[in-house]
Image (cartoon, rainbow, N blue to C red):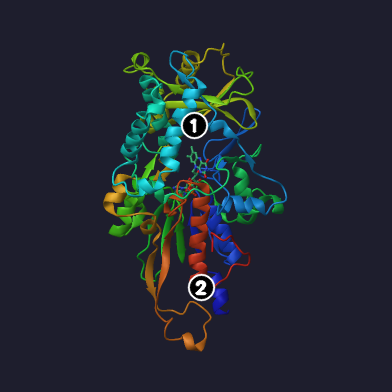
Amino acid sequence: MSQTQRNLDRKIVVIGAGASGIACATKLLEYGFQNVLVVEAEERVGGRIHTIPFGDNVIDLGAQWCHGERDNIVYELTRRQEEELLESTGPVYENYQCVRSNREVVPENVASRLKAIVGDSLVSRQLELRHCSGSLGSYLTNKFYETLRRPENADIDAVVAREFFDNYQKFENSVEASDTLEQVSGRGYLDYWECEGDILLNWKDKGYVELLKLLMRARELKSELGVLEQRLLLGTRALKINWNRNDGRVELELSNGENCIADHVVVTVSLGVLKEQHWRLFEPKLPVEKQRAIEGLAFGTVNKIFVEFPVAFWPDDWTGFTLLWRDEDLDDIRGTSRAWLEDVFGFYRVSYQPRILAGWITNVNGRHMETLPEDEILSGCMYLFRRFLHWNIPDPSSFRTSAWHTNENFRGSYSYRSMETENLGTGARELAHPLTVVSTTPEREREPSDELQQSRCDKPIVQFAGEASSEHYYSTVHGAVEAGWREAKRLADFYGQSASWSGTKSQL
Ligand SMILES: Cc1cc2nc3c(=O)[nH]c(=O)nc-3n(C[C@H](O)[C@H](O)[C@H](O)COP(=O)(O)OP(=O)(O)OC[C@H]3O[C@@H](n4cnc5c(N)ncnc54)[C@H](O)[C@@H]3O)c2cc1C
């Protein structure tokens, strides 16, 4: 057997079948590696991509939109298809109404100016943010009130402005997955690069699961798991990763009772899972720098609430509303079993779902909601609809929420860069750094002249992918895919393999 063939037969186990794990495994197959196995704790693939049938179509409990076009791997993958898979969601998250808890709708000329102030603070003032040493929260608060004090805004009611800003902070917490914006690093916010183009592209009537099918080539091969058929162990958890064997290989203990020896393991579990479980998952313990990255990078909870009505009770041109609580009305729920409702910040229309409104909730109350019985959550939502909206609201016909934190396979929604990340001087690069052993065996077919310089090298044996390991596209699916491809390429480079199929610019 040639060296190349031996290399392509190396056993590679990918832990996790979310976007990153699927991207990594399918890319490894493209590079020619044959012995690839994906181990997934859930009974389904997709991870934080979870499309389910609901209402008139499907809904996404996790990722919903492709955020941007330029240098976005997900967007570029869809462009290679004949069918237009993505579609603009339109200005749903711009044209919403701001409604106060006494049902008063904030007049459009005031609401649009308040929206412009917060939008401008983040979009056009990135230079200022670069020099900000504090939190995103303190930066935004200063900016908001500074702009509000300008003479041209003198007509805006100060109480309404504060209610708006309170609500806006909850919205921005959902973008970051933070509990409070004081936790988010102002400078770290800029680590995230927004891809140019439409940032709310939806998957029409198909849902985000369509991306997984594309990666696995499921439609083309007419099989549910496409190229990963026979290579996926669903409902199987990796319990222990022993990476300190004498032979430089890795031993995995799996929840199905089997042990498996691999040449390489790619870990794609969420940062939430790593935070909670790295102590017991890795044997020996992870190096200090890796532990610091896991501790320092932040991971929070964002949940969705889908309410289906028998008929739409809203006008055609209405896209949704945000909830502006008046202080005196908050007293009605604070200290009661409905206190958690304070953090539901808005309900919006959903593309291809004419009778559904989707609500969002973050932070400690978002986690608390996961522990409540369904009827209590639903009655809370109906309380909000009837408290804020002046229409006659029919009883709902169906209801579904996500619960990303209580599930031990996720422990939250997505990662962000916190003040702690900055204080510990750590980041995605440290998380992505592989665990290696010094390899003395020749790993590639080499030119005789290579002999000396390649006889010793660091061999990656445990690698880390997943959205949180993406330097600039963390918290997204395109970041997760790119991280999966990055780790597949690391192995291909190590063994001198080139992809049989050329990737995107950002991948290279
Ligand atoms: C509510 C919500 C909304 C979002 N909206 C968007 C959006 O609109 N656009 C966007 O781009 N992104 C969005 N995201 C983020 C996006 O979903 C994630 O960044 C991405 O899907 C993460 O993929 P991943 O492969 O890194 O991790 P995951 O999807 O978490 O995959 C990791 C897998 O590992 C498995 N696993 C865990 N532990 C073990 C173990 N011990 N053994 C075996 N398997 C294990 C898990 O079950 C999981 O399937 C959203 C996320 C949430 C939660």
Near-viewer residue (139 or 290): 139
Near-viewer residue (420 or 436): 420
Q: Is residue 384 left or right of residue 60?
A: left
Q: Give the number of the mark in front: 2 or 1.
A: 1
Mark 1 surroundings within 10 Å by alpha-carbon count, few (fewer than 14), some (14 through 19), many (20 or more): many
CA gap, disc 2 and disc 1? 43 Å
Q: Mark 1 sits on what residue? A: 304
Tell me: is circle 1 under 8 Å from ligand 1.
yes
* Secondary element type, mark 2: helix
**Circle on res. 495:** 2
Q: Position of residue 327 (x, y in %)?
A: 34, 17
* Secondary element type, mark 1: strand
Q: Is residue 213 left or right of residue 17?
A: right
**What residue appears at the point 42 percent right and 34 percent down from the top-left corner?**
118
Which comes sooner in the sequence, label 2 or label 1? 1
Q: Position of residue 311 (x, y in %)?
A: 64, 18
Residue 231 against residue 410 in the figure, above or below = below
